[in-house]
Image (tube, rainbow, N blue to C red):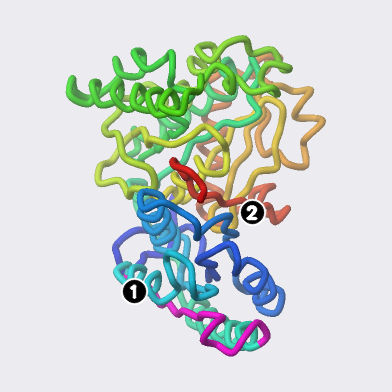
Amino acid sequence: MQLSGYRRPDGRVGFRNHVLVLPTVACANGVVSAIIRKAPEAVMLPMDSGCGMLKEDQVVFAKTLTNLAGHPNVAAVLCVGLGCEAFKPDQARAAIERFGKPVKSITMHNAGGYAATIEKGVALVHELAAAASKLRREPVDMSDFIMGLNCGASDPASGLTANQALGAAVDLLVDAGGSAIIGETTECVGAEAEMAANAASPELARRIIDTVHRFEGHVKMYGADLSTGEPNQGNMEAGLSTLEEKSLGCIRKIGSRPIVDVIEYADIPTKKGPMLMDSPSYDAPSVTGIVAGGAQVVVFTTGLGTPFGMSIVPVIKVMSNTPAFRRMEDTADVNAGAILDGEETIQDTGKRIFQLALEVANGRTTKAEDLGENQCQIWRTTLTL
Protein backbone atom coordinates (compact mmCIF):
# COMPACT_ATOMS: atom_id res chain seq x y z
CA MET A 1 0.00 0.00 0.00
CA GLN A 2 1.22 3.47 -0.90
CA LEU A 3 1.73 5.64 2.19
CA SER A 4 0.94 9.34 2.20
CA GLY A 5 1.76 11.88 4.86
CA TYR A 6 2.77 15.43 5.70
CA ARG A 7 6.46 16.15 5.25
CA ARG A 8 7.53 18.48 8.07
CA PRO A 9 10.33 21.08 7.98
CA ASP A 10 12.64 18.81 10.03
CA GLY A 11 12.26 16.04 7.41
CA ARG A 12 10.04 13.74 9.44
CA VAL A 13 6.59 12.64 8.27
CA GLY A 14 3.26 13.06 10.02
CA PHE A 15 0.13 11.00 9.38
CA ARG A 16 -2.14 13.55 11.03
CA ASN A 17 -2.16 17.35 10.68
CA HIS A 18 -3.11 18.62 14.14
CA VAL A 19 -2.88 22.08 15.62
CA LEU A 20 -1.85 21.43 19.22
CA VAL A 21 -2.72 23.69 22.14
CA LEU A 22 -0.25 22.59 24.79
CA PRO A 23 -0.41 23.53 28.48
CA THR A 24 3.04 23.89 30.00
CA VAL A 25 1.69 23.17 33.49
CA ALA A 26 -1.35 21.41 34.95
CA CYS A 27 -2.66 24.80 36.14
CA ALA A 28 -3.31 25.70 32.49
CA ASN A 29 -5.40 22.62 31.62
CA GLY A 30 -8.67 24.46 32.32
CA VAL A 31 -7.95 27.50 30.17
CA VAL A 32 -6.63 25.27 27.37
CA SER A 33 -9.82 23.18 27.50
CA ALA A 34 -11.82 26.40 27.20
CA ILE A 35 -9.79 27.43 24.15
CA ILE A 36 -10.42 24.06 22.53
CA ARG A 37 -14.17 24.31 23.14
CA LYS A 38 -14.22 27.61 21.25
CA ALA A 39 -11.70 26.45 18.61
CA PRO A 40 -12.48 22.74 18.03
CA GLU A 41 -10.19 22.61 15.01
CA ALA A 42 -7.33 22.16 17.51
CA VAL A 43 -6.46 19.41 20.02
CA MET A 44 -4.79 19.48 23.43
CA LEU A 45 -2.61 17.23 25.58
CA PRO A 46 -3.46 17.47 29.29
CA MET A 47 -0.58 17.90 31.72
CA ASP A 48 -0.48 16.42 35.23
CA SER A 49 2.63 18.31 36.29
CA GLY A 50 4.97 21.15 35.33
CA CYS A 51 5.71 22.43 38.79
CA GLY A 52 7.12 21.16 42.10
CA MET A 53 9.78 19.06 40.42
CA LEU A 54 13.38 18.31 41.24
CA LYS A 55 15.97 19.30 38.64
CA GLU A 56 16.20 15.82 37.11
CA ASP A 57 12.46 15.75 36.44
CA GLN A 58 12.45 19.32 35.16
CA VAL A 59 14.94 18.26 32.47
CA VAL A 60 12.86 15.23 31.46
CA PHE A 61 9.65 17.27 31.51
CA ALA A 62 11.08 20.00 29.26
CA LYS A 63 12.52 17.48 26.80
CA THR A 64 9.31 15.46 26.64
CA LEU A 65 7.05 18.49 26.28
CA THR A 66 9.28 19.87 23.52
CA ASN A 67 9.37 16.58 21.61
CA LEU A 68 5.60 16.11 21.94
CA ALA A 69 5.09 19.53 20.38
CA GLY A 70 7.69 18.72 17.73
CA HIS A 71 5.88 15.48 16.85
CA PRO A 72 5.40 15.11 13.09
CA ASN A 73 1.62 14.58 13.47
CA VAL A 74 1.51 18.17 14.75
CA ALA A 75 1.47 20.98 12.17
CA ALA A 76 1.53 23.94 14.55
CA VAL A 77 1.61 24.63 18.29
CA LEU A 78 0.22 27.11 20.78
CA CYS A 79 1.89 26.88 24.22
CA VAL A 80 -0.27 28.11 27.10
CA GLY A 81 0.94 28.50 30.67
CA LEU A 82 0.30 30.22 33.96
CA GLY A 83 3.65 32.00 34.15
CA CYS A 84 5.38 30.65 37.25
CA GLU A 85 5.97 27.04 36.13
CA ALA A 86 9.34 25.36 35.66
CA PHE A 87 9.17 25.41 31.84
CA LYS A 88 7.40 28.59 30.79
CA PRO A 89 5.50 29.03 27.50
CA ASP A 90 8.15 31.34 26.01
CA GLN A 91 10.88 28.84 26.90
CA ALA A 92 8.84 26.03 25.37
CA ARG A 93 8.23 28.07 22.21
CA ALA A 94 11.96 28.73 21.80
CA ALA A 95 12.75 25.03 22.21
CA ILE A 96 10.01 23.93 19.79
CA GLU A 97 11.11 26.36 17.10
CA ARG A 98 14.00 24.05 16.21
CA PHE A 99 11.47 21.75 14.50
CA GLY A 100 10.67 24.52 12.03
CA LYS A 101 6.90 24.54 12.53
CA PRO A 102 4.75 27.55 13.50
CA VAL A 103 4.62 28.00 17.28
CA LYS A 104 3.05 30.69 19.48
CA SER A 105 2.87 31.17 23.24
CA ILE A 106 0.61 32.82 25.84
CA THR A 107 1.04 33.27 29.59
CA MET A 108 -2.02 33.96 31.76
CA HIS A 109 -0.06 36.22 34.08
CA ASN A 110 0.82 38.48 31.11
CA ALA A 111 -2.25 38.06 28.89
CA GLY A 112 -4.65 39.83 31.25
CA GLY A 113 -6.20 36.89 33.04
CA TYR A 114 -8.28 33.82 32.24
CA ALA A 115 -10.85 35.29 29.84
CA ALA A 116 -8.23 37.30 27.98
CA THR A 117 -6.06 34.20 27.59
CA ILE A 118 -9.00 32.33 26.08
CA GLU A 119 -9.80 35.16 23.67
CA LYS A 120 -6.20 35.52 22.52
CA GLY A 121 -5.74 31.76 22.38
CA VAL A 122 -8.78 31.22 20.18
CA ALA A 123 -7.58 33.92 17.76
CA LEU A 124 -4.14 32.33 17.55
CA VAL A 125 -5.61 28.86 16.99
CA HIS A 126 -7.72 30.14 14.10
CA GLU A 127 -4.59 31.68 12.58
CA LEU A 128 -2.50 28.52 12.99
CA ALA A 129 -5.31 26.25 11.76
CA ALA A 130 -5.85 28.34 8.64
CA ALA A 131 -2.20 27.87 7.68
CA ALA A 132 -2.21 24.14 8.58
CA SER A 133 -5.30 23.52 6.44
CA LYS A 134 -3.32 24.45 3.34
CA LEU A 135 -0.84 21.59 3.87
CA ARG A 136 -1.36 18.53 1.69
CA ARG A 137 -0.40 14.88 1.93
CA GLU A 138 2.30 13.57 -0.38
CA PRO A 139 3.66 10.07 -1.08
CA VAL A 140 6.13 8.97 1.61
CA ASP A 141 8.33 5.94 2.16
CA MET A 142 7.81 3.10 4.62
CA SER A 143 11.13 4.09 6.19
CA ASP A 144 9.35 7.22 7.47
CA PHE A 145 6.98 5.09 9.59
CA ILE A 146 7.63 4.60 13.31
CA MET A 147 5.16 2.34 15.12
CA GLY A 148 4.77 2.64 18.89
CA LEU A 149 4.10 -0.57 20.85
CA ASN A 150 2.36 -0.83 24.20
CA CYS A 151 0.27 -3.27 26.20
CA GLY A 152 -2.10 -2.68 29.08
CA ALA A 153 -4.71 -4.58 31.11
CA SER A 154 -2.96 -7.76 30.00
CA ASP A 155 -4.19 -11.30 30.56
CA PRO A 156 -2.61 -14.75 29.99
CA ALA A 157 -3.78 -14.68 26.35
CA SER A 158 -1.96 -11.40 25.64
CA GLY A 159 1.41 -13.12 25.27
CA LEU A 160 -0.10 -15.93 23.20
CA THR A 161 -2.19 -13.96 20.70
CA ALA A 162 -2.20 -10.13 20.61
CA ASN A 163 1.47 -9.59 21.45
CA GLN A 164 2.61 -12.40 19.14
CA ALA A 165 0.52 -11.04 16.28
CA LEU A 166 1.81 -7.52 16.86
CA GLY A 167 5.35 -8.92 16.72
CA ALA A 168 4.50 -10.44 13.34
CA ALA A 169 3.21 -7.04 12.17
CA VAL A 170 6.40 -5.36 13.38
CA ASP A 171 8.47 -7.86 11.37
CA LEU A 172 6.52 -6.88 8.24
CA LEU A 173 7.05 -3.18 8.96
CA VAL A 174 10.78 -3.57 9.68
CA ASP A 175 11.28 -5.72 6.57
CA ALA A 176 9.69 -2.89 4.57
CA GLY A 177 12.14 -0.36 6.07
CA GLY A 178 10.10 0.96 9.01
CA SER A 179 10.82 1.21 12.73
CA ALA A 180 9.14 0.27 16.00
CA ILE A 181 9.59 1.41 19.61
CA ILE A 182 8.75 -0.81 22.57
CA GLY A 183 8.82 0.65 26.08
CA GLU A 184 7.75 -0.68 29.48
CA THR A 185 11.18 -1.57 30.87
CA THR A 186 9.48 -3.01 33.96
CA GLU A 187 7.90 -5.64 31.75
CA CYS A 188 11.26 -6.75 30.41
CA VAL A 189 12.31 -7.91 33.90
CA GLY A 190 12.76 -11.66 33.77
CA ALA A 191 12.89 -11.62 29.98
CA GLU A 192 15.87 -9.30 29.50
CA ALA A 193 18.23 -12.13 28.56
CA GLU A 194 15.94 -13.27 25.77
CA MET A 195 15.58 -9.73 24.48
CA ALA A 196 19.34 -9.19 24.68
CA ALA A 197 19.93 -12.38 22.69
CA ASN A 198 18.11 -10.66 19.82
CA ALA A 199 20.28 -7.54 19.91
CA ALA A 200 22.13 -6.45 16.78
CA SER A 201 25.50 -6.49 18.61
CA PRO A 202 27.09 -7.70 21.86
CA GLU A 203 27.47 -4.09 23.01
CA LEU A 204 23.77 -3.47 22.47
CA ALA A 205 22.92 -6.70 24.30
CA ARG A 206 24.81 -5.37 27.33
CA ARG A 207 22.93 -2.08 27.12
CA ILE A 208 19.60 -3.91 27.16
CA ILE A 209 20.60 -5.89 30.24
CA ASP A 210 22.01 -2.76 31.93
CA THR A 211 18.86 -0.76 31.19
CA VAL A 212 16.59 -3.37 32.75
CA HIS A 213 18.85 -3.82 35.78
CA ARG A 214 19.11 -0.04 36.22
CA PHE A 215 15.32 0.13 36.40
CA GLU A 216 15.26 -2.60 39.02
CA GLY A 217 17.95 -0.77 41.00
CA HIS A 218 16.00 2.48 40.83
CA VAL A 219 12.98 0.79 42.42
CA LYS A 220 15.13 -0.84 45.11
CA MET A 221 16.61 2.57 45.92
CA TYR A 222 13.23 3.49 47.38
CA GLY A 223 13.13 0.27 49.40
CA ALA A 224 10.41 -1.11 47.13
CA ASP A 225 9.97 -4.50 45.47
CA LEU A 226 8.74 -4.70 41.86
CA SER A 227 6.86 -7.89 42.64
CA THR A 228 4.44 -5.93 44.87
CA GLY A 229 3.19 -3.95 41.86
CA GLU A 230 3.81 -6.26 38.91
CA PRO A 231 1.76 -8.07 37.80
CA ASN A 232 -0.86 -5.57 38.92
CA GLN A 233 -4.17 -6.46 40.52
CA GLY A 234 -6.05 -6.60 37.21
CA ASN A 235 -3.37 -8.81 35.64
CA MET A 236 -3.54 -11.28 38.53
CA GLU A 237 -7.34 -11.37 38.54
CA ALA A 238 -7.14 -12.18 34.82
CA GLY A 239 -4.77 -15.08 35.53
CA LEU A 240 -1.18 -13.82 35.17
CA SER A 241 0.94 -15.29 37.94
CA THR A 242 4.37 -13.61 37.94
CA LEU A 243 6.24 -10.65 36.48
CA GLU A 244 8.39 -13.11 34.49
CA GLU A 245 5.29 -14.60 32.85
CA LYS A 246 4.02 -11.12 32.00
CA SER A 247 7.43 -10.04 30.67
CA LEU A 248 7.89 -13.08 28.45
CA GLY A 249 4.57 -12.21 26.81
CA CYS A 250 5.24 -8.48 26.69
CA ILE A 251 8.49 -8.66 24.73
CA ARG A 252 6.77 -10.57 21.87
CA LYS A 253 5.52 -7.21 20.63
CA ILE A 254 8.94 -6.23 19.30
CA GLY A 255 9.03 -9.11 16.82
CA SER A 256 11.94 -11.28 15.76
CA ARG A 257 14.19 -8.88 13.85
CA PRO A 258 17.44 -7.69 15.52
CA ILE A 259 16.97 -4.85 18.00
CA VAL A 260 19.02 -1.91 16.73
CA ASP A 261 19.09 0.51 19.67
CA VAL A 262 18.20 1.37 23.27
CA ILE A 263 17.06 4.96 23.73
CA GLU A 264 16.26 7.09 26.76
CA TYR A 265 12.77 8.21 27.66
CA ALA A 266 11.21 10.60 25.08
CA ASP A 267 14.34 10.63 22.90
CA ILE A 268 13.93 10.83 19.12
CA PRO A 269 15.52 7.77 17.45
CA THR A 270 18.49 8.13 15.13
CA LYS A 271 18.35 4.57 13.78
CA LYS A 272 15.84 2.52 11.77
CA GLY A 273 14.42 -0.77 13.02
CA PRO A 274 13.12 -2.22 16.31
CA MET A 275 14.29 -0.49 19.49
CA LEU A 276 13.72 -0.35 23.24
CA MET A 277 12.87 2.88 25.06
CA ASP A 278 13.54 2.99 28.80
CA SER A 279 10.12 3.79 30.27
CA PRO A 280 7.70 2.71 33.01
CA SER A 281 4.97 0.13 32.53
CA TYR A 282 2.00 2.38 33.31
CA ASP A 283 0.17 3.09 30.05
CA ALA A 284 0.04 6.89 30.06
CA PRO A 285 3.72 7.73 30.74
CA SER A 286 4.92 4.82 28.61
CA VAL A 287 2.94 5.89 25.53
CA THR A 288 3.74 9.55 26.18
CA GLY A 289 7.47 8.79 25.99
CA ILE A 290 7.08 6.68 22.85
CA VAL A 291 5.02 9.39 21.14
CA ALA A 292 7.54 12.06 22.16
CA GLY A 293 10.08 9.86 20.38
CA GLY A 294 8.10 10.32 17.17
CA ALA A 295 5.91 7.23 16.76
CA GLN A 296 3.09 8.38 14.46
CA VAL A 297 0.81 5.37 15.14
CA VAL A 298 0.61 3.35 18.37
CA VAL A 299 -0.59 -0.26 18.49
CA PHE A 300 -1.84 -1.12 21.96
CA THR A 301 -2.54 -4.73 22.92
CA THR A 302 -4.89 -5.59 25.78
CA GLY A 303 -6.50 -8.62 27.37
CA LEU A 304 -9.15 -6.99 29.57
CA GLY A 305 -9.76 -3.94 27.40
CA THR A 306 -9.04 -0.22 27.81
CA PRO A 307 -10.23 2.93 26.02
CA PHE A 308 -6.73 4.47 26.09
CA GLY A 309 -6.04 7.09 23.44
CA MET A 310 -3.95 10.19 22.82
CA SER A 311 -5.07 13.19 20.81
CA ILE A 312 -2.05 13.60 18.53
CA VAL A 313 -1.60 9.92 17.59
CA PRO A 314 -4.05 7.26 16.45
CA VAL A 315 -4.00 4.32 18.88
CA ILE A 316 -4.98 0.93 17.42
CA LYS A 317 -6.39 -1.40 20.10
CA VAL A 318 -5.80 -5.16 19.70
CA MET A 319 -7.75 -7.50 22.01
CA SER A 320 -6.23 -10.84 23.03
CA ASN A 321 -9.45 -12.88 23.34
CA THR A 322 -12.90 -12.95 21.76
CA PRO A 323 -15.07 -12.67 24.92
CA ALA A 324 -13.28 -9.48 25.98
CA PHE A 325 -13.47 -8.14 22.41
CA ARG A 326 -17.24 -8.60 22.44
CA ARG A 327 -17.50 -6.83 25.80
CA MET A 328 -15.28 -3.94 24.74
CA GLU A 329 -15.85 -3.87 20.99
CA ASP A 330 -16.60 -0.15 20.97
CA THR A 331 -13.01 0.51 22.14
CA ALA A 332 -11.15 -2.17 20.13
CA ASP A 333 -10.03 -2.30 16.49
CA VAL A 334 -8.70 -5.86 16.09
CA ASN A 335 -9.70 -9.19 17.69
CA ALA A 336 -6.59 -11.34 18.05
CA GLY A 337 -8.79 -13.85 19.86
CA ALA A 338 -9.40 -15.32 16.42
CA ILE A 339 -6.07 -17.09 16.95
CA LEU A 340 -7.32 -18.91 20.07
CA ASP A 341 -10.60 -19.61 18.29
CA GLY A 342 -8.68 -21.44 15.53
CA GLU A 343 -9.89 -19.04 12.85
CA GLU A 344 -6.53 -17.38 12.11
CA THR A 345 -2.83 -18.00 12.56
CA ILE A 346 -0.52 -15.55 14.33
CA GLN A 347 0.78 -14.51 10.92
CA ASP A 348 -2.76 -13.95 9.59
CA THR A 349 -3.61 -11.61 12.47
CA GLY A 350 -0.21 -9.93 12.18
CA LYS A 351 -0.94 -9.15 8.53
CA ARG A 352 -4.31 -7.69 9.52
CA ILE A 353 -2.68 -5.44 12.12
CA PHE A 354 -0.02 -4.32 9.63
CA GLN A 355 -2.64 -3.60 6.96
CA LEU A 356 -4.78 -1.65 9.43
CA ALA A 357 -1.75 0.36 10.58
CA LEU A 358 -1.13 1.43 6.97
CA GLU A 359 -4.79 2.38 6.51
CA VAL A 360 -4.71 4.39 9.75
CA ALA A 361 -1.51 6.10 8.63
CA ASN A 362 -3.32 7.08 5.44
CA GLY A 363 -6.21 8.62 7.37
CA ARG A 364 -8.57 5.92 8.65
CA THR A 365 -9.59 6.73 12.23
CA THR A 366 -9.29 4.37 15.19
CA LYS A 367 -11.90 3.68 17.89
CA ALA A 368 -9.87 5.75 20.38
CA GLU A 369 -9.87 8.72 17.98
CA ASP A 370 -13.62 8.37 17.38
CA LEU A 371 -14.23 8.30 21.14
CA GLY A 372 -12.03 11.36 21.73
CA GLU A 373 -9.86 9.53 24.29
CA ASN A 374 -6.90 11.65 25.34
CA GLN A 375 -4.35 10.76 28.00
CA CYS A 376 -0.86 12.17 28.52
CA GLN A 377 1.52 11.83 31.46
CA ILE A 378 5.21 12.67 31.55
CA TRP A 379 7.30 10.23 33.59
CA ARG A 380 8.60 11.51 36.92
CA THR A 381 11.37 9.43 38.45
CA THR A 382 11.98 11.43 41.63
CA LEU A 383 9.89 12.89 44.42
CA THR A 384 6.99 15.32 44.15
CA LEU A 385 7.79 18.41 46.22
Write down the region rendered in magenta.
Answer: 100-115
Residue marked by disc 2: 374
Q: Position of residue 306 (x, y in %)?
A: 70, 37
Left or right, residue 143 beside residue 64: left
Residue marked by disc 1: 94
Residue drawn at (71%, 74%), measured in percent from left and top? 37
Name the foreground residue: 63 vs 383: 383
Q: Position of residue 23 (x, y in %)?
A: 54, 67
* Amino acid type assigned to the residue bearing label 2 in the image: Asn
Residue drawn at (30%, 18%), measured in percent from left and top? 196
**Kind of element beneath mark 1:** helix
* Amino acid type assigned to the residue bearing label 1 in the image: Ala
Q: Position of residue 39 (x, y in %)?
A: 66, 78
Mark closer to the chain start, 2 or 1: 1
Residue drawn at (54%, 85%), measured in percent from left and top? 124
Q: Quadrant of residue 238?
A: top right
Q: Does 212 sit above or below residue 295?
A: above
| Mark 2 nearby-residue class (10 Å; few <14, some 14–19, many ≥20) | some
